Each structure stands twice: as C-alpha cells, then as structure tokens.
Image (cartoon, grey):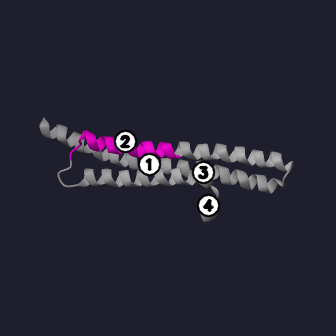
Amino acid sequence: MGKIWQEMGYIRWPLLFSFLAMVGLSLWSAMRLYRPGATADLRTKAWIDTVLFWGGFALIAGVLGTFVGFILAAQSVAQAGGVEISLVWYGMKVALSSSAVGALILALAALAWFALQLRWRLLLAGEERGAA
C-alpha cells in the first residue's frame, strides 16, 4: 500500500486533504450533536453537509488522477514504441488506485454523513415534539 501511495503522485495530496477534512468535520459535528444540551441548529447541519462534500471531492480528485495517469501511461507507451504488457497493466493499476481511494473516502463520508444526519433529525424531532 505504501508503494502505491508514493506512486500515485501529486493526486495523493488532495486525497489526503479531503480525507482529513472529512474526518475532522465528522468529529466536530459529532461533538456538537452529542454534547449535553445539543440542539438541531442550522450551523451544525451545515457542518454535517460539508462532510459529504469532501467525500465527493475525493472521488472527483481520484478520477482526475486516473485520467492523468492514463494519459501519462499512453504517452510513455507511444514514446517507447512498444513495451511489455505487464508494465502497462502495472501502470493502469497505479492509475486506477487513485479512483479507488477516492471512492473509499466517499463511502466513509457517506456513512458518517448518514449517521450525523440521523442524529440531527432525531434532535430536531425531539425539539418539535417538546414545543408541541
């Protein structure tokens, strides 16, 4: 995994940033939702929605990394005039790994978003029931 991480090139940094942003925002939102006396305020809802945004950003960055990886691989093959097929497939594996990492980050973000959204809605329902 470490070798592929290194070989992903520059795209690993936006992926890492989006992962850290998603985790940080998830933790921040969870702290706001599970503290004593928590309420379903709109500011917390905005933080919850940014969790899903950063997951989507990771997927887009991963796909961009794959496109760039395929373009670079095609250029290398064209310049070499012909290469061993195992090297081509290794290059494709490295290029596709950025999309896989981006999809994984999006999946984690979607799970976190769902759990936080559920808690926010339960708090909102409890406030509405108490006001009635």
Marks 3, 1: nearer the viewer: 3
Instruction: Give the amino acid type for the residue marked by disc 4 in the picture.
Output: Gln
Residue ID for mark 4:
6
Whichever of labels 2 and 4 marks the residue nearer the N terminus, that label is: 4
- Mark 3 in CB contact with mark 1 (< 8 angstroms): no
Whichever of labels 4 and 1 marks the residue nearer the N terminus, that label is: 4
Query: Mark 1, residues whose alpha carbon is within 10 Å: few (<14), some, or many (≥20)?
Result: many
Which numbered dot is residue 49?
2
Residue ID for mark 1:
109
Distance from the alpha carbon under mark 3 to that under mark 2 = 24 Å
Range of the magenta residues?
39-58
Q: Secondary structure at mark 3?
A: helix
Marks 4, 1: nearer the viewer: 4
| Rendering coords of residue 109 (x, y %) | 44, 48
Residue ID for mark 3:
98
Quadrant hosting residue 46: top left
Q: Residue furthest bottom?
A: 2
Where is the C terminus found, in terms of image quarters?
A: top left
Marks 3, 4: nearer the viewer: 4
| Rendering coords of residue 86 (x, y %) | 79, 56
- Mark 3 in CB contact with mark 2 (< 8 angstroms): no
Instruction: Give the amino acid type for the residue marked by disc 3 in the picture.
Output: Ser
